Image (spheres, rainbow, N blue to C red):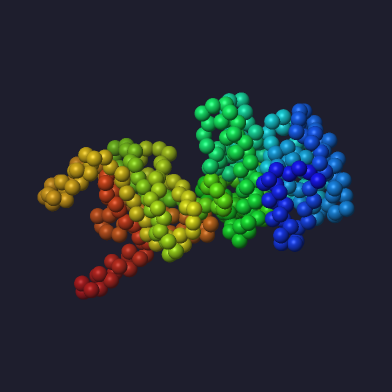
């Protein structure tokens, strides 16, 4: 039997546990471990096909790691393109090659691929960048992966590349361990018209053009799943450009999140709506409340205290952001929620202050209750 890396041994164990998978590793052939890699992959394909001749081709699911991805592609092609292929693809010597010389969508009825570390740095890129499947997943933009430390030297760079490339294997393992949790992809989190899919074993074949790239975030350890929230926040009457340091915490029906920094890709100015993505390691449930904090300087903090002590002082000169409306979309549920300031003055976000926003419908009900009591 083939001498599997430890991670691939784990995949074999996970496949055999439910007793509905029959996994057969290929023969112990080491020709792919030395140059010329791209030529040797076609040689080892012969041995792979010999392993699966006794199975109906449409029942075969080939899973390949790195060079093994292209081996599986060649094998799938020789089997008549009737099976299913799930891949973690290698790039060197395959990038830009013709479809017949690398993994491609014609190699099986359905082909999906995971791309990690596709960006070339210091002349080294291990993953393939171009689309090679019906569905191409690009975790964390297909670049550095969480948990793989930045490099300071050439040797550290090699370890970082190895870590990022192998991360795709753990993502596939995670899909076997967490089949009940749907992992939705895409920074916009819009799943209409088959724009989303599930990474790993439970990937769905969609009626769309091959070569579709999907993106999502992960964390550094298993389970790698994170929960995605897209925020659309409207700032109004903002004359001067500003780059505030804002944090946000979320309160849901299940639990509260910690404070997290907000990253805006541009300066805040004018009457515009800004979009940013927040990811959580756990499911907080349905969102009920948001807390924003502007991390101000010592000077701003002293000014805020002076405003508290002197209620007659004018607040017009103070730096502030005026929030019109906040819309949140949960990627995993596709639920949309609109949040409004809890108090009338809460629309103004100032340095060194915390602002609370609640569901707009609940805030409206509270205001209605106040009016009824006043009558």
Seen from the viewer's position, the closer of residues 148 and 90 is 148
Which quadrant of the figure has residue 327?
bottom left
- From where the camera sits, is residue 181 visible? yes
Please tell me whether residue 361 is drawn above or below residue 37 in the rendered image.
below
Q: Which residue is drawn at 52% across and 52% down?
A: 226
Q: Is residue 217 visible?
A: no
Q: Which of 272 and 306 is in front in this view?
A: 306
Left of 135 or right of it: where is 25? Answer: right
Residue shown at the point (53%, 42%) measured from the top left: 147
Residue 368, given in percent of the width and then of the height, sits at 29, 69
Image coords of residue 219 (percent x, y): 53, 47
Q: Which residue is drawn at 26% across and 57% down?
A: 344
**The C terminus lies in which quarter of the figure?**
bottom left
Total numbered badges shown on the rendered structure: 0
Q: Quadrant of residue 47?
A: top right
Residue, x 55% and y 39% (percent of image)? 148
**Residue 152: x and y, percent?**
51, 28
| Residue 34 horizontal side relative to residue 137, left or right | right
In the figure, residue 18 lies in which quadrant? bottom right
Percent across and percent down for residue 84 are 75, 50
Residue 343 placement, left or right of 65: left
């Amino acid at each position: 039997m083939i001498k599997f890396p430890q991670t691939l041994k784990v995949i074999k164990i996970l496949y055999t546990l439910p007793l509905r998978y029959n996994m057969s590793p290929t023969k112990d052939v080491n020709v792919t471990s030395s140059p010329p890699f791209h030529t040797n992959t076609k040689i080892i394909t012969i041995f792979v096909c010999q392993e699966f001749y006794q199975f109906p081709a449409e029942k075969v699911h080939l899973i390949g790691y790195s060079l093994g991805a292209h081996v599986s592609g060649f094998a799938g092609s020789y089997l008549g393109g009737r099976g299913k292929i799930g891949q973690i693809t290698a790039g060197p010597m395959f990038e830009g090659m013709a479809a017949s010389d690398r993994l491609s969508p014609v190699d099986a009825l359905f082909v999906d691929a995971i791309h990690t570390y596709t960006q070339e740095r210091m002349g080294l890129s291990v993953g393939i960048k171009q689309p090679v499947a019906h569905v191409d997943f690009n975790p964390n933009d297909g670049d550095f992966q969480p948990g793989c430390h930045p490099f300071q030297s050439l040797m550290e760079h090699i370890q970082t590349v190895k870590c990022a490339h192998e991360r795709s294997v753990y993502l596939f393992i995670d899909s076997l361990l967490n089949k009940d949790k749907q992992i939705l992809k895409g920074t916009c989190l819009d799943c209409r018209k088959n724009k989303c899919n599930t990474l790993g074993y439970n990937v769905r074949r969609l009626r769309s053009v091959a070569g579709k790239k999907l993106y999502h975030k992960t964390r550094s350890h298993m389970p790698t799943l994170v929960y995605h929230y897209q925020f659309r926040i409207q700032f109004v009457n903002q004359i001067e450009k500003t780059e505030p340091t804002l944090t946000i915490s979320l309160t849901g029906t299940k639990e509260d999140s910690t404070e997290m920094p907000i990253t805006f890709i541009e300066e805040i100015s004018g009457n515009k709506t800004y979009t940013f993505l927040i990811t959580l390691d756990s499911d907080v449930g349905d969102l009920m409340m948001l807390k924003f904090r502007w991390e101000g300087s010592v000077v701003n903090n002293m000014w805020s205290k002076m405003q508290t002590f002197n209620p007659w002082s004018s607040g017009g000169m103070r730096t502030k952001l005026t929030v019109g409306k906040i819309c949140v979309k949960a990627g995993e549920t596709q639920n949309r929620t609109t949040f409004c300031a809890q108090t009338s003055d809460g629309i103004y976000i100032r340095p060194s202050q915390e602002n609370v926003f609640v569901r707009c419908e609940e805030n409206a009900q509270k205001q209605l209750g106040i009016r009824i009591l006043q009558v």
